[in-house]
Each structure stands twice: as C-alpha cells, then as structure tokens.
Image: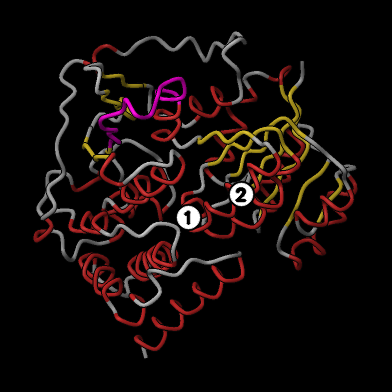
Amino acid sequence: MTKKIILLGSTGSIGESTLNAISKKKTKFKIKLLTTNRNVKKIYKQAIKYNVKKIVINDKNLFYKYKNIFDKKKIKVFFNLKDFLIRNKIKVDFVVSAISGLDGLEPTIKIIKHTKNLCMANKESIICGWMLIDKELKKNETNFIPIDSEHFSVWNLIKNENKKNIKKIYLTASGGPFLKRKLKNIENIKPKIALKHPNWKMGKKISIDSATMMNKIFEVIEARKIFNMKSEDFKILIHPKSYIHAIVHFKTGLTKFLAHNTTMEIPIINSLYSKQELLTYENQDLNYKKLNGLNFITPDIKNFPLLKILNYKYNNTYFEVILVTANDILVKMYLENSIKYIDIHKQLIKVLKNPYFVKYYKQSPKNINEIRNMVKKVKIFFNKKLK
C-alpha cells in the first residue's frame, strides 16, 4: 500500500532528511505536497526529483515571480498552506512538520485534521504551543509521533509501558564543540568556531544552541509536554559519541536504551513504518565499538550555566514563549557578532528574571495570536534595550 505524505518545510535539514529516507523506499510513498518559505531553487529540484505536483511558496513576491516556471512543469503552486487546503479536500497518512521556529506552529495546527499521523521535529512550536497542538490532535484523533532523535527514542522505549513504573528518563547530549573547555576560556569565542559541531551537520541556530546546551534544555521541556511528565522525571547526560539517544530507567530495576547512528533519517523512516511492516534501512549493523566505553558525563553547570533554566517549573505559560524568543534574539545577535558568546548566557538569565516578564509566568496564551503578541513584546523589549 502506498502511503500519502505532506512535508511542511521540505527545504530545511529535517525536510531533506525525510526526502532522503523515503527516496530509498520509492514504491511505498507518494508525496502530495512540499512547502517552503523562500528556497524556490531547492523546492523546484525536489518537486522534479520526487514527482510532486503541488507545492507551497509562502513568500508572495517569490510566488508571483516563479509561478510560471512551475506551471510549465505542470506543478501547481499555492501561496500558503491555507490556500492549498481550501482547494484540496485531502486526508493523508502522514504529515511531517519540519518548519523551523514558531513559524511552524500555525501550519501544523491547520494540517492536523488532514492527516492520520503527525510526525514533528519543531522544538519551538511544541514548547510554546503544545496545548494548542494537543487539543487538535485529540479533537481529530490524529496520532502524534516525535521524530527528533531523543524524543523518538523515548517514545519507542515507553509506548508499551506503564508510566508509573518509570523512575528516570535520561536524554543524551553530545556536549557540543566546547565539551573539554571551560566557559571562562571561551567567553569571546567566535561564531565560526562555535558552529563546528563534532557529530552532527546542523543549521547555525541549532548549532549554537547545542554549544550552550540550550538545545537540550528545550528538549527536556518538549519531553515534559509530549509525555505529560514532570521536569524532575528527566535528566541530561553528556554522551560524546551520540550513539545512544535516550535511556529509560524503571522502578523494576530494568534499564532500556535506544541507539542508532548520527542521522535523522533513522528515526524518520522508522516513524513512517508500523511494527507489522518489514523495513531495512541500508543494512545498518550494530556498531558495538561505539558501545564499548560509552563515557557518560554529568554536565557541569559552571560550563553550561543555562541549565539553571530547568529550575523554572512553569508549564504551558508565557514563560516558554519568552524563553524561546529571547534565546532566538541573542543567538542571532551572536551570529552577527553583535554580542559575545558569554552574553548569550548572561543576558538570557537576566531577561528571564526581569520583572517585566516575570508577571506573565502564571498566565497562559489561549491562541496563536496571543503567542505572537508575546513574541512582539520580547522583540520590542530588546529593541529598546539596544537603543
């Protein structure tokens, strides 16, 4: 049986990994829609290569500029997802939501009722808008599958278990490029060095988040929401080999872990197959050499001071929106050489303690517009500060 798929954000790293994964199983999948914001050149190549007849280009100027080129190839172009859904009454087997940042929240919510399964790897949308996503999932009886490697691993390890039997869940972190260096010695480190992740090829934003450990803080917050658990149920362990992605320790005395090579294609392709289906992914053998001497390390809070953020116990409030937005702004400033590496750490903690924001930590956004309004407030705060 051929599975119908919609891929939101096909030109990003997760989108490309998804296409690479399913291209190895051509007879099993039919892509019904690809979307991009501005990367017209790449989505054109993708549409031709994978024989996709419908795409979305979110940038209106680019939509009008290049529409005729797609028309010549008999590829229908839509200027946003809403336009596509109005004109196409469709229900697919899987939607892979791979749009980065909070831009992915609204299209994800809109697409849920049009799919049987939602596969998602968008940290910001889950962190800031999980209550909205979860509401739509339940309303439409849509299955949710996290495809970020750590969350996919946890999902796999506990889906047939009683959560009351779980003692602790460990999410692993690579430690980034500065694992063996003291924070005081890299306070002024240049972005080009911070971007050199030892194990993964990632975008600039997530590479800096990996260096500061912010990425793993986001993942703990995500996991708490996805699996409906408390912050204290999770712990971060540094695992430089990045072969084991999650460990679950049970009260029964048993410990389970999930391991795979450092590619997002493995959790993605496994998400698209059921247990009853036969799946062979490139004849991957067990890399027992990586299992020899796993070398787990507890992260040092002196070198990764942003870990203090996990002491904040707010859930489904404006705290998460403020945290994500402030971090986005500071990382962008660092990449533009406007601030030092150490300033990401210092300024983020300072912003979170600011009375102007603290007053919102017990309030919850009720819709996407309220989330957007808070994002604007954080940006205005930083603009005033810069002036």
User: Where is the N terminus found, in terms of image quarters?
Assistant: top right
Q: Residue at x 15, y 59 (%)?
A: 186
- The residue labelled by disc 2 is 135
Q: Residue at x 36, y 77 (%)?
A: 357
Q: Secondary structure at mark 2?
A: helix
Report whether 200 appears left or right of 187.
Answer: right
Q: CA distance from mark 2 to mark 1?
A: 17 Å
User: In the current view of this chain or complex, which residue is farthest to the front?
Assistant: 164
* Residue nearer the viewer, 31 or 234: 234
- The residue labelled by disc 1 is 124
Magenta span covers which residues? 156-172
User: In the current view of this chain or complex, which residue is farthest to the bottom?
Assistant: 387
Q: Residue at x 46, y 24 (%)?
A: 159
Q: Position of residue 342 (x, y in %)?
A: 20, 66
Q: Secondary structure at mark 1?
A: helix
Q: Position of residue 109 (x, y in %)?
A: 66, 52
